[in-house]
Image (tube, rainbow, N blue to C red):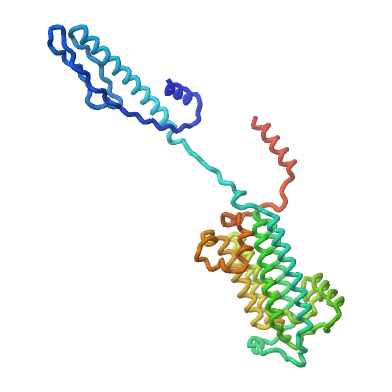
Amino acid sequence: MAASQLMNDNDDEDVPIHVEVTVTTVAEPPSPPRQLANGTPARPPSSPSSPTPTGAVTSPTAMPGAAGGAEGSGKHSSGRADRLKENRLIRSLHHQLSRHRDYIKITVPEGRTDRLPNEWWKTGVAFLYALFNLFFTTVIITVVHERVPDKSVSPPLPDKFFDYVDRIPWAFTVTEVNGLILVGLWTIQWLFLKHKSIIGRRCFFLIGSLYMYRCVTMYATTLPVPGKHMVCAPKLYNDSTGKIWRMLKLISGGGLSLTGTHLMCGDFLYSGHTVTLTLSYLFIKEYSPPWMRWYHWLCWLLSATGVVCILIGHEHYSIDVIIAYFVTTRIFWWYHTMANTHALQDAPNNYLSRTWWNPVFKFLERNVQTSVPVVFSWPVSLPHCCTQRYSMVGTGRDE
């Protein structure tokens, strides 16, 4: 009765249902031989030794004889008739289910928000971290400026690049213009990325860490000016108010020589301009589609030209540029290797996890369960009221 009801429900509704039916045929034990009235044993009715094959129909035959034999044969016939009805019902049910067997599909959608959560509050923390280290860099530059030896007492150190290439005065202007172009391109590209919160916190963390390293190297070793053409502001010594004003002036001008606000010396080891040029190109290439080769080559040309012009302008020693390039590329590649290879994050033999910033990395990347795809979207989404009105109009048309 239940199987018949299931068939009727399945015919009425088009919902695919996966049901497994197991049929076991149990052979009945042989009944004891019956005897006729005259004592002669009655011939037992023929019964199949094996279960009735699917699709085979056997008609019961009545045995001539006494009334007892006819009664036993009738019972066997009714039993086989019931089994035949049951087999027909099972075959019909199997046929109905096999019609929908190929259309059963179970899909478990993955929550993309769970695998790539925005977590803008973490991006805000990374931004404050970068902002603090940029401000701290101006403090260290102000402190180091008071320790730079006078160029008349300590001449520039010998540099092999300076021996072969004469200084070009306008070369450093090209460096800063290229840097501004790259930073502008990366900012626009970042605004159009879909997962800008995750990418932004990575960028802010790397900027903050690189400038923190720069503070350490600048304070640890103070190099003399790389050329006698450089003009350094006079030392203030114990004038704390004047130092604060210099710091604010440097911050307002973005630390650029184009704005005329960077007149302090001592921030040589290592080059902050090289960090900006290299890091901007790395992020532009990492988070743009591979088919934009012309865009990648253009950004690489801007970055490489800017780095070379630093040396042509004799604004930094060669060792400043080399160390800046090495530190920037390594920390970028280490971070993204750990971020894109999730098997490394908990591997016991992962030596990258021994970095001091590994706890910070786990904090920023804990809920990012997959590699961040390069997907673009509009930076400003439509208001919720407009989206709701559009959906209501669409629903009315469908109805």
Q: Residue furthest bottom?
A: 153
> Residue at point 40% right, 26% down?
93
When the figure is inspected, residue 160 is found, relative to residue 305, above or below; the finding is below
Residue in the foreground of this view, choosing between 255 and 351: 351
- Residue 248 percent across, percent down from the top left: 83, 71
> Residue at point 43% right, 32% down?
19
Task: For residue 294, say whether it is visible.
Answer: no
> Residue at point 56% right, 46% down?
110
Quadrant containing the N terminus is: top left
**Left of 141 or right of it: where is 192?**
left
- Residue 379 percent across, percent down from the top left: 71, 53
- Residue 249 percent across, percent down from the top left: 83, 73
**Left of 90 or right of it: where is 110?**
right
> Residue at point 83% right, 77% down?
243
Quadrant containing the C terminus is: top right
Task: For residue 18, say whether it is visible.
Answer: yes
Count the marks: how many? Answer: 0
Please identify the quarter of the rendering in which residue 318 is found. Answer: bottom right
When the figure is inspected, residue 365 is found, relative to residue 226, above or below; the finding is above
Please identify the quarter of the rendering in which residue 387 is found. Answer: top right
- Residue 82 percent across, percent down from the top left: 33, 18
